[in-house]
Image (cartoon, rainbow, N blue to C red):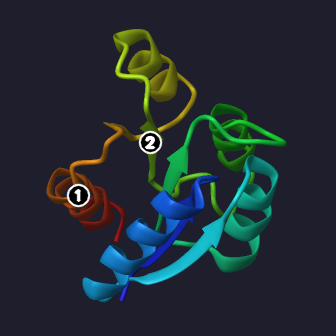
Amino acid sequence: MSKILVVEDSPMIQEILIERLLLRDYEVVAANNGQEAVELAQRERPDLILMDISLPVMDGWEATQCIRNIDNIKDTPIIALTAHALIEDRNKSLELGCNDFETKPINFSQLVLKMESLLSKHE
């Protein structure tokens, strides 16, 4: 069973993602801001991270950069989640270390395909 770290500051979106992931038999841990995401990633060592970009305390891009600089979790696949569908946001997410990108509202079926692809490469 893969462990997913959901980083999302919207309680509603976080709850929906967690419920849908649990239904697919993923183990789920959740963070509400970027700083918490880095701390949880170090402690929980998830198999994949869903990283909202617009977060309090530390944004998702900064949290991703921090994670990429920590030896035992630096290769963890990260999918950026953002309401900004601009190509610049996608490019910046990939440049800063995210493996993939999904815009909100989230197409859950598409997100799961991306997750499964990254998880299979990371095993």
Where is residue 100? Give x, y as percent.
35, 39
Q: Which of 19 and 45 is in front in this view?
A: 19
Quadrant location, the C terminus: bottom left
Q: In the image, 101: left or right of 5?
A: left
Examine the rendered structure and indicate whether residue 98 appears above or below residue 22.
above
Q: In the image, 57: left or right of 110?
A: right
Query: Which of the numbered marks, if any, corresponds to residue 60?
Result: none
The residue wearing badge 1 is: 108
Crowdedness near tag 1: few (<14), some (14–19) or many (≥20) residues, C-alpha within 10 Å: some
Quadrant location, the N terminus: bottom left
Image quadrant assignment for residue 94 = top left
Q: In the image, 104: left or right of 94?
A: left
Where is residue 78? Give x, y as percent.
47, 49
The residue sitting at 69% across, 49% down in the picture is 67
Q: Which residue lies furthest to the top in this view?
A: 88
Q: What element carries label 1?
A: helix
The residue sitting at 63% across, 61% down in the picture is 73
Where is residue 46? Give x, y as percent.
55, 72
Marks 2 and 1 close (CB-CB < 8 Å): no
Q: What element carries label 2?
A: strand
The residue sitting at 53% across, 34% down in the picture is 97
The residue wearing badge 2 is: 81
Tell me which amino acid carries mark 1: Phe
Q: In the image, 45: left or right of 92?
A: right
Of marks 2 and 1, which one's residue comes earlier in the chain? Answer: 2
The residue sitting at 31% across, 75% down in the picture is 20
Q: In whole angstroms, how far apart are the C-alphas of marks 2 and 1?
A: 11 Å
Examine the rendered structure and indicate whether residue 110 appears above or below residue 5.
above
Q: Nearer the viewer, residue 54 or 41?
A: 54
Crowdedness near tag 2: few (<14), some (14–19) or many (≥20) residues, C-alpha within 10 Å: many
